[in-house]
Amino acid sequence: MLVLVTFLLLIILLSRVTEEMTKIPSTLSVIVYSFAVSLFFPELFEINSQEFDEILYLMLPVILLPDILNISIKELKNHAKEIFYLAVVAVVLSIAIATLVTPYLLPEYSLTAGMLVALFAMLMATDAITVASIMSKFKLPEQLKIYAESESLFNDVTALIIFYFIALPLITGGEVTLLSVNYILLKVLILSTVIGVAVAYAGFLFIKVLKNPFDQFVVIYLVVIISFLLAEHFHIAGILSIVASALTFKSLVQKETKNETQRRSKIGGVQSAKDQESILELIKNVPAITKREFREYKKEAMFIGIFANAIVFVIIANIIELRFLLTYSKEILIVFLITTLIRFMSVSALVVAMKLPFRWAKTLTLSGTKGALAIIMAHSIPESFIYKDMFEAIVIGNVLISTFFYTFVLMFHIKFNKDEYALDMQVDKQSSDAGILEYTKSVVDILEKDSFTQAYNRAFIEDIITNELARASRYKLDLSLLILKLSKTDEENNVDALEIVGDIITEHIRTNDYFGKLGEDEYVIVTSNTSLGGAVILAEKISQQFDTQEVVHSSMEYFFGATQADETDSMEAVLEKLREALSRTIGSDRHTIEIEV
């Protein structure tokens, strides 16, 4: 076992190093390295189909949790129609079209409608694990990533329902009617969601009672694992329960943290006859979790998810049988072409209808990688099924081809259209800023700006930094920050100088940048989607403008520091780096702009 764990860690490390050196997603190199290890050490990764299914079921909640926690509930609501089309309508229509077309392309097989529905139900749904892993490596517009990642989470549910409750009964000779399908659909959707929501509420109450960070972290995992186990026990959609529980839990935490500063403990006081209500009210007002704690939990869940994800791809690599893949190579390629063309048509329809850049259709098509869930469904086909070996070979072959071929083509496509996607990201950011501006106006009565500089106060700017860090980490965007310290030398002109400072900064920053006040004489400028070099240039321009203003130049000294956020930086870490840079600036010439990375 120790040797196995050692090899797993080595494979993960090598794949991460390969990703840093070549920009090839670690998902691909994990499969390659694992397959190489299995060739030279076949006894190390001995695993059968049943063990594969059990390991994947164990890993699913662990892998999906960080991806779901990082999905914006607001964005899901904003794009609900498009996601419903991709995750439900497109899957159903694609399976129907493929079922009609395939008999003409594979006439040598006596494939019934039920058989074809089963085959394409396994292949039309994109794999959430693989898609999230691959899409996180590319700089793309937020809206495009939301489409791809949200679709991959929800279309698994559609495919599972079609496969287990329609296709398998048709294969085994069961009766399937429109009434029974509607009944099953309602039962699965409602029960899976109810289980997920109920478990999330129970877990949230436990979080309120347990104050130890480790205990709270364990509860978060128990929420998704228990919801998954309960759903699977009742033979409904376990993945939907995972999604429902994680989204509900996240929603409860966000609601709680919004009122973080307004909480009041109601311990003690006069007892009344309504003891039960008092206890419930007491529990309700106990703070469950802070924003900082929740950020740290999401980061830790991401690290655990990386390890679990690697395990899944290691075992995928070790169930590959080249003999079967070569035997059914023609069938694998034909089915791959069918699924690719149909997917391209279905996503193109959405892109055209939404008047989006047509290059998005290519990216969405290439994000349609299949994964381990398709292999589990293939293993669920009865042993007596005449085409079981062929179906398993087609599924595994398409998983491998889609993972490698789609990813490499996607890399070239994004590189070739780098400038266009950069422009898309700017447009995407500007459109989202409209919503941010509305939000800012709605809270202006609560969050007053500094009366002299018009900088946002500390509470608001810290929330902005936190949100921008999460967005930059998730979508692989540049995020740089500047810190400005003003040291007064002339109290008489201080007010006028501060007003001019505020005007200069406001004129030089973009609408998607933020200017806030950290302390008595400390300010921060958040420059989203900007490199460190770009932030330094901005600081130089502002400093030059300060020099031209006699009131500013004569009444205060000004010092700048700069930093660029890393993927795992917290707000505290970013502010610490800014102050480190600032301390070096103060120790040198005041016009020197020091950086800390």
Image (tube, rainbow, N blue to C red):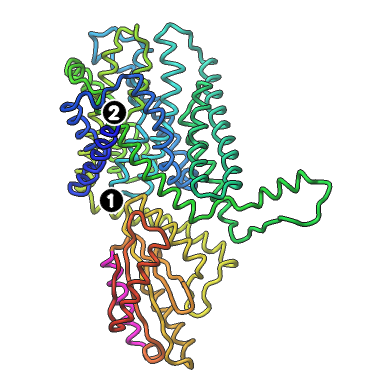
Instruction: Tell me the residue at 27%/29% (across/down).
Output: 340
Q: Quadrant of residue 38?
A: top left
Q: Relative to the observer, which residue lies in front, 143 or 71?
A: 71
Mark 2, residue position: 315
Q: Which residue is mark 1?
A: 421
Q: Quadrant of the C terminus?
A: bottom left
Look at the image and give the residue range highlighted in magenta: 532-549
160 or 234: nearer the eye? Answer: 234
Q: Position of residue 182 (x, y in %)?
A: 53, 20
Mark nearest the camera among 1 and 2 is 2
Vertical placement of 193 versus 545: above or below?
above
Count up the numbered dots.
2
User: Whole-percent x and y of residue 498?
Assistant: 45, 83
Rendered-image quadrant of the N terminus: top left
Cα separation, mark 1 vs mark 2, equals 35 Å
Residue 503 among magenta residues: no
Asked if 167 appears above or below 347 in the picture, the reply is: above
Which amino acid type is marked by label 2? Answer: Ile
Q: Quadrant of residue 508?
A: bottom left
Query: Residue 189 placed where, x, y %?
Result: 53, 28
Q: Residues within 10 Å of mark 1 (few under 14, many from 20)?
A: some
Which quadrant of the view contains residue 146?
top left
> In the structure shown, which secondary structural element does the residue marked by tag 2 occupy?
helix
Q: Earlier in the sequence, mark 1 or mark 2?
A: 2
Residue at the image position 39 percent from the left and 32 percent from the top: 59
Is 534 in the magenta? yes
